[in-house]
Every structure is written in C-alpha cells, then in structure tokens.
Amino acid sequence: MSSPSDALLDSGRPYEVERGVKTDSYIKAVTNNPMLPTYAPSAKYAKRAPRSASEEMEESAKVIVKRPEGQVGLTATELEEYRNDPCWRTLRLVLFWLFWILWILLLLLALLIVIFSPKCAPKMAPNWWQSAIAYNVWVPSFSDSDGDGVGDVDGLISKLDNLRKTGVQTVWPRPFLLSDGFSDAIRDFRALDSKLGVNTDAEKLIEAVHAKGMKLVIDFPLTTTSLEHDWFLRSQAASKEENKDYAQYYTWSGKAGLDTNFFSKLKDTSYFHKEGNPKAPVLNWDNAHVKMAVLDEISSWIFRGVDGFHLTGIEYLARSPNFTRPNWKVVAETISDIRNHVETFANESAKEGQEPKKIIVFASLEGSKEKDKRRLVSDLHLNSLVNYELTNVEKNTKICHKNEGNVGLCTYEILADLLMFHSLHDDVIPAWEFGNPFVSRLASRVGSRRHAELLLMVQLMLPGSNAFYYGDELGMRNLPNDTKIAGQQGAMQWDDSAGAGFSSKADVPIGSDYKNVNWQRQYNDEQSSLKTFARLSKLRQRDETLTLGQTLMGRIVDGSAFTMARFMKGDNQTAVGTIYVIGVNFSPKEVDLPLDTLPSLTTLGKAMIVAVSSNVEDLSPRESVDLSSKHFHLGPDQGVVFRYTAEKVVPLN
C-alpha cells in the first residue's frame, strides 16, 4: 500500500502557494512538493502514543512543505511547536523585560545628556540702536506749523510720515531743551525750548514718534547750564541760608592767575566755564548733590518716554588740576554711573507685564583718540561713540588734499582705518555721520551732489548705526555766507512752492535751488538721491547682513574708486548667505573695478542689482548681471550696490 506521501508525489501537480495570501488551512495550500525533506523526530517526541491514520497523513503533509521562493526563517506551523514550550516562554519573558529596562535606561541617559550638556550660546538679538537709521533734525529750520517763520515741534510731527517713508527709524531733534540761543547753556533740563513749542508738545512728539514705530533720542548737555539757570543763581548767592546747599554746584575760585579761557570773574570771585564761553558755566560733578540732581533730570525724560540720550560736554565731567584738560579715567567712571542709573531706572519704571526699555546712551567726541574710544565705550560706559572722522571729509583740505582731485581716496583711507579699529574692538559699536548741525553740508564740502550721494550710499552699507543730517539725502547745499544763520542750517526744501514748503514767512533763509532740489520732486522721481537713500535704508531693516555682518574693503583703483563687501561669517572663516557689494567711482573717468578679493567668487555669475546712484541709466534694481569676469564697469561719478549668494562652504579670499 502506498503512503500518503507517495500519493502526493504521484499527483503531478506543481507546488502553488501564493505568498502573502492566507488560505483556509495550511494543508489545502500545499499541492505537491517533489522533494521530501528528511524528518528525524527528536527524543522529546519519540515516546508519543500511537496516532491514527488521519493524524499520520496530516503530519506527513506538514513535513513535506516547501517554502515559497525567497522566504526566510521558520513557518507559522513550525513556530507553533515552540509557542507553549516552557523554556522558550521563559526566554521570551526575560528578553521582553530586558528590552523595556534597556529602553528606559537609554531614555534616562538622553535626558541627563540634555540637562547637563553645555548650553548652546543663544543668538542675541541686537539692541535697536545697533542698526538704527537716525535722522538728525535742526528743528528751527525743518517745518514751521504756525507761520511765525521758525520751525517747531508741531511742524516736525507733521513730517514724520515723510521720514518713515524713506526708512528713518530714529528721530533726533536738535535743539530740544530750553537753552540760551539753541545752545548747551541749559536754562531748564525738564522744559522744551519755548521757541519750538509749549512744554506739553514734548510728550506729543514722543507719542507721535512711537505711533509711527520709530524711536526718539535727545541731546542732553550733562555739564553746562545757562547763567540764568536756577542752580547758578542760587550758587552765586550761596551766602543766603536758603541757598547754602548750592554753594558747590559750580566751581568757584578766588585765586589769581586763572586761565581766562576757562574762568571768568563774577563780583569778587571767578567761576569755571566751557572753554571760551563764559555764558556756559560748568557743573561740579565732584559734588554728590549735582550728580543726583542731573540724574533725576535724566530720569524725568525716561519716564516721559524718550529712547536715548546723546550726552554732550562729557569732557567736562572731570578735569585736570588746572581745569584745562579732561581726566578721561574719571570721566569714564562717571559715565559708567550714569549708564547704570539709566538702565536701573528703565527697569524699575517699566509697567507690569512690559519689557524694560532699552535706552541708548551715546556721545560725540571731536578729536578723540582710539584709546579714548575704547575707554569710553568698554565695560559699562557709553553704548556707542559717534565716529567724528567722516565729518572731516572735505575736498581740497589737509585730509583730502587738492592733488587728489576728489574725496574718494581720503574716504577710503578713513573708512579702512576705522573699520580695522572696530574689527579689533568689537565691543565698540560703530556709529557714523557725515554731517550734523555744526559742520558744513556734505554736498558743499565735497563740491558735488553726485559725490555726496555716493558717500551716503557708502554710509548706508557700513555696519552699526547711522545718523543723517536733514536735507543731506536731497543734496542740499550751504546757504550763502552772508546769511544770519549758519550755512548748514537753512530751511528744509520740501517742495517748489513759495517758502519751499517750510514756512509762509521767510525768517529762515531758503536755498536758491529749492525749485529743482526738494523732497517732493525727488520722492516722485524713479531715480533720485532720496530714492536711493530710501531703498538702502529700508533694505537694512530687512537684512541683518548690512548691520551685523563682516566688512571687507576692496582695493582702491586710480585713487578714486573702490568696493566694499558685507557678509555673514560662518565657521572656519567662511562667508554664508547673501553677500552685498557696493562699488563707487569718484573719478570723472570710467573705471573697471576688480572683484577678485570678494568672497565666494564662483557665484558672481548670478548677481543682482540692489541700488544704483541716480545718474546710472544702463542698470536698474532687481536686474540680473553676470560678473563672472570678476570685474565691474562703472561710469564717472557712479555707484552701484549688488548682491549674490555664497556657496555652502567658501573660504574667504
């Protein structure tokens, strides 16, 4: 009699099991297997009781199963034998618990690594003033709201929208505090100058500036008052009982032979004053009452909402024994006390639920040396010190010699020197200005509106904060020398109407070119100095590369043209992200600027124009240019800003 296995072999049907399809039973899935595996029962199952014929057939069918091609491991039927085996059950249970114990241990280890590993340095957001575009307004000449011929605070408020449209972020009105003739001889530290408006107009200006999303900083003379200030009047009458506490508010001396540049007689004694200005007596900061009184005045303005203080007269905070020179060591220590007070008061006066205000404390110091800058800004001293050097850029002077023909070379040398200083002392945040109320207008100094525009473009590409003097963005020039006010303080040229849109009364002289050079005309033009200013100032607000990035000066060409690049530096001295480059040509001739010193040269073929000076006609913003030749052609008196993207890892050249 043939066995069931023989019957299966004789059936002649192939082995057909569709992989992945579950049938009613394993036996029905098996059709025919031409190869019978050798089956050797283990000793464990050798003594089993005899089985019926049907059980024998089922067992035989199981052992002749052929696995589908590609199947690896035991089948479900084969695994079934081990499911209830005590040995395997114990092993599975042990492995199960070992897995979960190991998983929990690894989780705890990961948590411990996160908790105790060194923290990554957080990316610190810069303070608002580290990248601000400040607009320095000589208020009496800016906008007259009431027709009395003098600009005022209400006039300034009426023009805030104009400033915001051109990218201005900070308003810096000068003068501001009540003084003698718009000077540092302060009559009242808490009062707005009455020629500019009533005292409540100060709060109105602060609120209006903030409503436009801008900041407001004011001049604050720390060390000088008017002869009419209440403190001085009390100090000179200190013999009276009610004035005795004011005796040492100023420096008085009865000695003979005092330097008359710094001391002037009053009755039978002499008082210390600003050099050459007897109408500006100097406060005695060695007196604790003076220090406390002035700090209280500063606090009052923080409480009213100002965002910063430009401290003037800091060189008089401490003097040499003969009072003729500053004692910079003590000056720095005193400024540190002032800044600490400002920060403390700002924190303590913050309303519940609001972040304390970040108040800037900065100064300008004509003629300061690099060591003075480091001393005055490092640690907890000034937040910033304005680089005065650019106000010396003037054609045909000792700094910009007449043999040079233009201001290109001297500007390049001044910038290269200052940028090197700031790169070596990165705690000294740079602040730049070409003009202010006390120096000749930029377009007049350099002898060309086109060159003045190029300098403004360069300034807007510099790192740090920038201050611009009203009207310089238009190319306004000085008034004639025979005017009754300083040439650089002429009326702002708003439009071509009578009075240039400044006032209906001509108390403040107006430049003769206001019909062609005015804000309204340049704002409506597609290409103008004002439009270039607005385009670059707004770009700075969007891209931190222009405010926080590294700066690389290119080579000077023909003593008149150069490039400057701005980029973010990654690891291993690489340039990353967007790279901005400005090229300027102060020469009356065309020039090819070399670009071989720029970072990530291989991507220059995909550059895009960002801004051009108003006299460039063959290029326009957002136009693509191929600079793979590593040269850039510029016409006479032209400037261009372009950008391209750095490769992922590009060592700086």
Image (cartoon, helix red, strand yellow):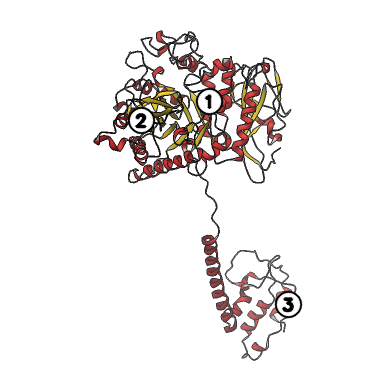
Residue 500 vs 191, above or below: the answer is: above
Q: What residue is pinned by disc 3?
A: 37
**Disc 2 on helix, strand or loop?**
helix
Tell whether label 2 touches label 3 (CB within 8 Å). no
Percent of width and height locating residue 114: 53, 60
Q: Name which residue lies at 54% across and 36% down.
A: 373
Q: Position of residue 67 (x, y in %)?
A: 69, 70
**Mark identifier at residue 391:** none
Distance from Cα at disc 1 to Cα at disc 2: 26 Å
The answer to whether residue 163 shows anywhere in this view is: yes
Q: Mark 3 is on which residue type?
A: Pro
Can you say whether 504 is above or below 374 in the image?
above
- From the image, state whether disc 1 or disc 2 is nearer to you: 2
Mark 1 or mark 2: which comes first in sequence?
Answer: 2
Taking depth in this image into account, of 610 and 329 the one nearest to the observer is 329
Name the secondary structure under disc 1: helix
Q: Earlier in the sequence, mark 3 or mark 2?
A: 3
Residues under numbered marks 1 and 2 in contact, where contact means CB atoms less than 8 Å apart: no
**Amino acid at dot 1:** Arg
Question: What residue would you read off at disc 1?
Answer: 535
Q: Label 1: how many residues lie within 10 Å, few (<14), some (14-19) or many (20+)?
A: some
Per the rendering, the mark at residue 206 is: 2
Q: Nearer the viewer, residue 530 or 30?
A: 530
Which residue type carries mark 2? Ile
Select label 1 or label 3 by which is in front. Answer: 1
Under tag 3, what secondary structure?
loop
Vertical arrangement, residue 538 with respect to residue 26, above or below: above
| Residue 510: percent from left, percent from top | 44, 11
Image quadrant assignment for residue 444? top right
Going from N to C along the chain, the mark reached first, 1 or 3, is: 3
